[in-house]
Amino acid sequence: MKRHKATRFFIIALVLFIQIAFLTMIVKETYAIDTRIAILLIGLIVLTLLFGHKYLDLHHDEYAYEKASIALWVPVGALLCYLLYTYTDVGNVIAAAIIGTAASFLPNINRNSDYLKKLPTAIYCGVFVGMSSPVVAPSVFYVIAAGIIAGVVFLLSKNLFVGIGGKLGTIAFVGVVMVTLINFIS
């Protein structure tokens, strides 16, 4: 039970940290404001996020994780979208639409298969990673690494942020930011 709570806390803290860091950079860069005002705005954002986490029902009470065999499709979707986007004249949005639409037909192969019914969501999560610009994701290996990290977050966050829009994009964003951070540090 403690492991489940620690995992849940880690994923929520990771998403919160990345959102705060990203919003801080946006506020600081866009508005070129005084550091004290930026800290005050960040404090308000943090309080809003903490209020939302404390008083809104964002999670199921039980602990469940996605199967690893499903999460493995996140980097596959990322790779397919990135390759289609970078090696053809198709834009990243159209590449995402093509891969996402193709993935949506996978459950039709066997309508009784629960496994196939879960694949489109995982692949579409990966598509968001694969939409990254070559300036941000300069190589296939970068996209695969970001897809793997996004797959791990996808696996661990099955019952987190239920009913909140943007979950798959946020998971993909976490994967790309983490690989960028690792690349920056090394």
Image (cartoon, grey):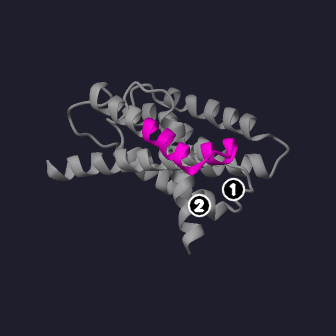
Q: Position of residue 70 (x, y in %)?
A: 42, 44
> Does residue 154 appear in the picture of this structure?
yes
**Three-letter amino acid code at the position of disc 1:** Val
Q: Is residue 116 above or below residue 82?
A: above
The label number, if any, that marks residue 136 in the structure image: 1
Dot 1: element? loop
What residue is drawn where x is 65% and y is 37%? 99
Which one is nearer the viewer's eye here, 119 or 97? 97
- Drawn side of residue 82 relative to residue 10, left or right: right
The numbered disc on residue 73 is none
Whole-angstrom CA distance, mark 2 to mark 1, is 8 Å
What segment is highlighted magenta in the picture?
26-45
Q: Are marks 2 and 1 in contact (CB under 8 Å)?
A: yes
Of helix, strand and loop, which mostly describes the magenta segment? helix
Amino acid type at mark 2? Thr
Look at the image and tell me whether residue 70 can be seen: no
Q: Residue furthest left?
A: 1
* Residue 169, x across and y down, in percent: 54, 38
At label 1, counting other C-alpha atoms closer than 10 Å, the crowd grade (few under 14, some 14-19, many 20 or more) is few
- Give the image location of residue 135, x and y in percent: 74, 56
Q: At x 67% / y 41%, what residue is drawn? A: 31
Residue drawn 41% across and 52% down?
152
| The stretch drawn in magenta includes residue 38 | yes
Residue ID for mark 2: 180
